[in-house]
């Protein structure tokens, strides 16, 4: 049984080199607070954030380093998705498309160097839905990508909005799935300090997205679209009962959908990156192990360095559940 990882990041050399060469095109100065200003020191690339340098990990752009990390983690196949700071949704439409093409070409080049171990996910210029569709179709036709990575919100706009529906429809029609990974939080208050933007902001943005997709009627309209959410779905598994209570008791929640939240929630897929075995058990009970896959968040420190050991902490995990999480769910989503 091969072990798959559906949450593994990349920042290909194609986009690193372009950011070094054309910093103004990527608005590096204006966006340096988001960690996307890139500089080079002694031949090595770094992110610069408010004057502080952090090396861009080799595992993000060198295939040999990625494979070495996979071997260390006992991962056989990883699906590569761009690191969220390089979504570039804030750029002008033409520059956003340029950035997406560079990242997608770079990921495809990484996959081509080790096709038995790596798979690719597309990133799209969501600030221009029409361009996003064109780029998606290119990635599917030229590279055979089976997945698309999207932010849980697009510059604070919800994916459930009508303006994004044609992109989601195209993803569905092409037989791809969406991997959702936050990069900012639409709710800003109280997030200062203590890494709260990450520990609270990211999972909060995920549950906000889940609520909008369910209650807006978007999931009713996208019946065959598969959506995988990072970080075990954030706070959403724990809030399902409250969603259902509101649906049962308040008419305003049922304006756009008559499908109960408990039913809609089972449409989603999740990675197993919960940092807690009891939370993973709750997630399994909510949606089934066949809707859960390993996610390492490699190479970042908020991920798992030994995902199989983390999985083993759940002592009640059955052999069937383990097979689904390690292999079966990912193979189904990737159509393998």
Image (cartoon, helix red, strand yellow):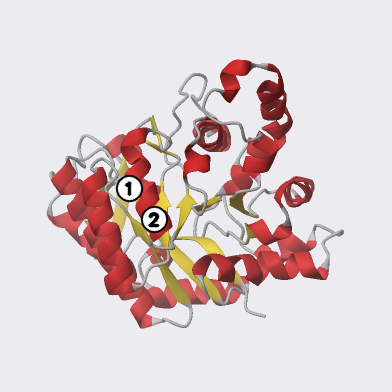
Picture coordinates of residue 81, whole percent (x, y): 41, 59
Q: Earlier in the sequence, mark 1 or mark 2?
A: 1
Picture coordinates of residue 160, whole percent (x, y): 43, 35
Seen in the picture, residue 215 relative to 40 is either above or below; the reply is above
The structure residue drawn at horizontal position 63% and vertical position 48%, both measured from the top left corner, is 232
User: Mark 2 packing: few (<14 Cα in 10 Å), some, or many (20+)?
Assistant: many
In the picture, measured across the screen, residue 187 lies left or right of residue 26, that is right
Element marked by disc 1? loop
**In the picture, residue 127 is in which quadrant?**
top left
Residue 83 seen in the current view? no
The structure residue drawn at horizontal position 45% and vertical position 31%, both measured from the top left corner, is 185
* 307 and 254: which is toward the camera: 254
Residue 125 seen in the current view? yes
Of all residues, the one furthest to the front in this rendering is 258
The structure residue drawn at horizontal position 41% and vertical position 38%, both measured from the top left corner, is 159
Of all residues, the one furthest to the right in this rendering is 316
Q: In the rendered image, which residue does mark 1 sit on?
A: 87
Comparing marks 1 and 2, which lies closer to the viewer?
A: 2
- Whole-angstrom CA distance, mark 1 to mark 2, is 18 Å
**In the picture, residue 137 is in which quadrant?**
bottom left
**In the picture, residue 214 is in which quadrant?**
top right
Picture coordinates of residue 65, whole percent (x, y): 44, 73
In the picture, measured across the screen, residue 144 lies left or right of residue 68, that is left
Element marked by disc 2? helix
Q: In the rendered image, which residue does mark 2 sit on?
A: 171
């Amino acid at each position: 049984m091969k072990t798959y990882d559906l949450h593994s990041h990349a920042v290909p050399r194609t986009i690193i080199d372009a950011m070094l060469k054309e910093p103004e095109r990527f608005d590096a100065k204006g966006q340096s607070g988001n960690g996307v200003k890139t500089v080079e020191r002694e031949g090595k690339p770094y992110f610069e954030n408010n004057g502080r340098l952090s090396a861009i990990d080799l595992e993000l752009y060198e295939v040999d380093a990625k494979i070495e990390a996979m071997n260390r983690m006992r991962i056989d196949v990883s699906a590569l998705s761009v690191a969220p700071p390089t979504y570039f949704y804030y750029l002008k439409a033409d520059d956003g498309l340029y950035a997406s093409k560079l990242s997608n070409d770079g990921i495809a080049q990484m996959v081509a160097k080790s096709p038995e171990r790596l798979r690719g996910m597309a990133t799209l210029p969501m600030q221009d839905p029409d361009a996003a569709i064109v780029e998606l179709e290119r990635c599917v036709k030229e590279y055979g990508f089976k997945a698309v990575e999207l932010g849980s919100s697009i510059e604070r706009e919800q994916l459930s909005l009508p303006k994004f529906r044609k992109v989601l429809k195209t993803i569905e029609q092409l037989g791809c799935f969406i991997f959702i990974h936050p990069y900012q939080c639409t709710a800003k208050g109280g997030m200062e300090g203590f890494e709260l933007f990450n520990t609270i902001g990211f999972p909060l943005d995920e549950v906000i997205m889940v609520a909008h997709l369910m209650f807006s009627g978007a999931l009713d309209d996208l019946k065959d679209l598969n959506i995988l959410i990072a970080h075990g779905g954030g706070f959403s598994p724990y809030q399902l009962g409250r969603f259902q209570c509101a649906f049962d008791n308040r008419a305003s929640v049922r304006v756009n959908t008559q499908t109960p939240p408990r039913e809609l929630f089972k449409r989603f897929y999740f990675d197993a990156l919960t940092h807690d075995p009891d939370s993973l058990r709750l997630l399994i009970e909510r949606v089934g192990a066949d809707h859960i896959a390993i996610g390492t968040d490699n190479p970042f420190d908020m991920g798992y360095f030994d995902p199989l050991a983390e999985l083993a902490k759940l002592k009640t995990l059955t052999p069937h559940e383990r097979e689904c999480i390690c292999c079966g769910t990912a193979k189904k989503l990737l159509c393998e």
